[in-house]
């Protein structure tokens, strides 16, 4: 069996935040660095990943049970169109 694990949006965001936080010293990044210590940040990362996991599992179960529309329509109805 091959491993085709994909990165979640939460994992991508964390990776980008850490990368940009290391390379750019903007006031907003400094505020994040000053107001959140390492242990709190690590805990927030774990919580965010767990929330994303549970949300995806719930979405799949709910869609599988209903199956009244295709998955894209169900996503739009459940979470709305997040185009910003």
Image (cartoon, rainbow, N blue to C red):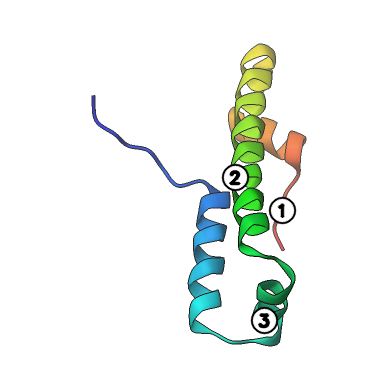
Residues at marks 2 and 3, CA–CA distance in whole angstroms: 22 Å
- Determine whether, in the image, residue 46 is placed left or right of residue 34: left
Q: Measuring from the top left, give residue 83's x and y in whole percent.
A: 70, 58
Classed neighbour count for the residue bearing mark 1: other residues with Cα under 10 Å, few (<14), some (14–19), many (≥20): few
- Helix, strand or loop at disc 2? helix
Q: Earlier in the sequence, mark 3 or mark 1?
A: 3
Q: Which residue is mark 2?
A: 46
Q: Earlier in the sequence, mark 2 or mark 3?
A: 3
- In this rendered view, identify the residue nearer to me: 25 or 64: 25
- Determine whether, in the image, residue 76 is placed left or right of residue 22: right
Image height of 32 relative to 5, above or below: below
Instruction: Kindly identify which numbered label has been placed on residue 82.
Output: 1
Q: Quadrant where the N terminus lies?
A: top left
Image height of 39 relative to 55, above or below: below
Q: Measuring from the top left, give residue 7's x and y in whole percent.
A: 45, 47
Q: Which residue is mark 3?
A: 30
Kindly indicate the quadrant of the structure image that contains residue 53: top right
The residue positioned farthest toward the top in the image shown: 65
Residues at marks 3 and 1, CA–CA distance in whole angstroms: 28 Å
Q: Are marks 3 and 1 in contact (CB under 8 Å)?
A: no
């Amino acid at each position: 069996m091959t491993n085709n694990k994909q990165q979640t949006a939460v994992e991508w965001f964390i990776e980008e935040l850490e990368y940009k936080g290391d390379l750019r010293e903007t006031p907003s990044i400094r505020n994040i660095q000053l107001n959140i210590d390492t242990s709190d940040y690590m805990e927030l990362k774990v919580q965010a990943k767990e929330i994303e996991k549970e949300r995806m599992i719930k979405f799949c179960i709910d869609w599988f049970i209903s199956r009244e529309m295709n998955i894209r329509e169900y996503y739009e109805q459940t979470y709305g169109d997040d185009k910003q």
